[in-house]
Amino acid sequence: MQGRISTVTAEGRKRARDQKLYQAYRTLREDKNLKGLSLYQRSALAELKIIGRDLYADIRKRGVMLPNGEVNPAVEAHRKNAHEQLYSLSVFIELNRTQSSEPIDLVAQMAQHIEASEPVEPEKPAESET
């Protein structure tokens, strides 16, 4: 059985962070609504989630207002992080939706556009001179 990871050393902090990242990634991978996300997309979202958790932990620990009367900078950073998570998720889902749909036939679309804008009348055969 493994013991707790020491967060005193740089290596221990890195291992603890990697473990948190893996847990967040695994949670995203198991979410049925996010099945279409690629490995890169899930990893990026997992990193944003870990950063958000760390910021929220700082807000809970130090409070919204600091002792000197200023707003905790983690509050604004957390707001931006939450916005980035939602934006990234919407972009990833839209990107995956458009990539999974049928490819667009540009030649057919161009032909339809040309036919609709310029009606072409058939050429009349030349009258023979006899």
Image (tube, helix red, strand yellow):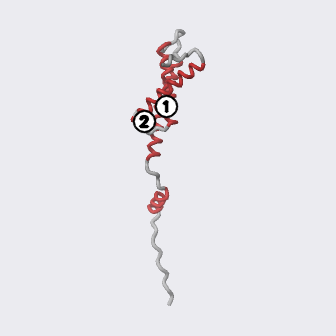
Q: Secondary structure at mark 1?
A: helix
The answer to which of 93 and 114 lies nearer the viewer is: 93
* Above or below: residue 2 compared with residue 99: above
What x and y, as percent, mark residue 96?
Answer: 46, 42
Q: Which mark identifies residue 77?
A: none
Q: Amino acid at mark 2?
A: Leu
Q: Residue furthest top?
A: 67
Q: Residue furthest right?
A: 10
Q: Of 24 and 73, which appears nearest the observer?
A: 24
Residue 16 % position (x, y):
53, 21
**Corner quadrant of residue 121:** bottom left
- Residue at 50%, 16% (x, y): give it: 3
Report the number of discs. 2
- Mark 1: few/some/many CA within 10 Å (<14, 14-19, 20+): many
Residue at coordinates 48% horizontally, 22% vertically from top-left?
A: 53
Choose between 70 and 88: the one closer to the eye. Answer: 88
Residue at 49% from the left image edge and 38% from the top image edge? 38
Q: Given the image, on which type of amino acid does mark 1 rest? A: Leu
Disc ID at residue 34: 2
Query: In front here: 56 or 27?
Result: 27
Q: Earlier in the sequence, mark 1 or mark 2?
A: 2
The residue to which callout 1 is attached is 45
Residue 100: x and y, percent? 44, 46
CB atoms at circles 1 and 2 under 8 Å apart?
Answer: yes
The answer for how far apart the CA atoms under marks 1 and 2 are is 11 Å
Q: Is residue 21 above or below residue 99?
A: above
Q: Mark 2: give few (<14), some (14-19) or many (20+) Cα within 10 Å.
A: some
Judged from the image, the secondary structure of the residue bearing numbered disc 2 is: helix
Q: Is residue 87 above or below residue 113?
A: above
